[in-house]
């Protein structure tokens, strides 16, 4: 019977311990909610600061890239222009026509083709001969 008495007297202590554990859990949950909100706000502020710093870095890099792009274009022009001039001189010496000359000639050929086509139309009407029969 002594064992049963001990079990019965221990029951209120176990209930009290379980209740305290429950309350500790609720307290931890409440603290996490409060601290979580503060932590969240703190993280947002730090993120905003980092965003400003990174935006400034990105803008500096973008400006640098634009400058380098301009430098590259200038360098290409310095190389390209003398090269093209040399190629044009060499092609002229060989008698190769320029694009402009080819375009001009193409337009002239089209014009002459139209004139010849009109002239053929007039001459074929005048010079039509009757068909000869092979007899």
Image (spheres, rainbow, N blue to C red):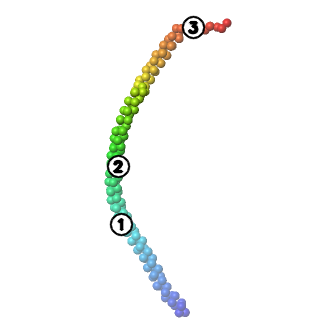
> In what element is the residue under mark 1?
helix
Separation of residues labelled 3 and 1 (CA atoms): 107 Å
Tell me the residue at 44%/23% (across/down).
106
Residue with the most extreme right position: 135
Above or below 15: residue 111 = above
Residue with the most extreme bottom position: 2
Tell me the residue at 52%/90% (across/down).
5
> In what element is the residue under mark 3?
loop
Residue 16 place in picture, x, y as percent: 45, 82
Tell me the residue at 46%/16% (across/down).
115
* Quadrant (top left/top right/bottom left/bottom right) for the C terminus: top right
Q: Nearer the viewer, residue 13 or 91?
A: 91
Residue 80: quarter of image: top left
Q: Which callout, 3 or 2, points at the residue further toward the start of the chain?
A: 2
Residue 91 place in picture, x, y as percent: 41, 29
In this orientation, does residue 48 appear? no
Q: Which mark is residue 129?
A: 3
Residue 55 place in picture, x, y as percent: 34, 54
According to the image, label 1 marks what residue?
38
> In what element is the residue under mark 2?
helix
Q: Which mark is residue 62?
A: 2
Which callout, 3 or 1, points to the residue nearer the camera? 3
Above or below 60: residue 22 = below
Which callout, 1 or 2, points to the residue nearer the camera? 2
């Amino acid at each position: 019977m002594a064992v049963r008495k001990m079990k019965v007297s221990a029951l209120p202590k176990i209930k009290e311990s379980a209740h305290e554990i429950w309350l500790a859990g609720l307290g931890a949950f409440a603290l996490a909610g409060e601290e979580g909100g503060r932590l969240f706000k703190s993280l947002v502020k730090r993120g905003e600061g980092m965003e400003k710093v990174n935006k400034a870095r990105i803008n500096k890099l973008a400006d640098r890239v634009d400058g380098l792009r301009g430098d590259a274009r200038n360098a290409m022009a310095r190389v390209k222009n003398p090269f093209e001039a040399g190629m044009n001189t060499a092609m002229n010496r060989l008698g190769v026509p320029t694009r402009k000359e080819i375009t001009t000639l193409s337009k002239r050929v089209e014009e002459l083709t139209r004139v010849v086509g009109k002239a053929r139309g007039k001459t074929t009407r005048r010079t039509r001969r009757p068909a000869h029969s092979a007899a």
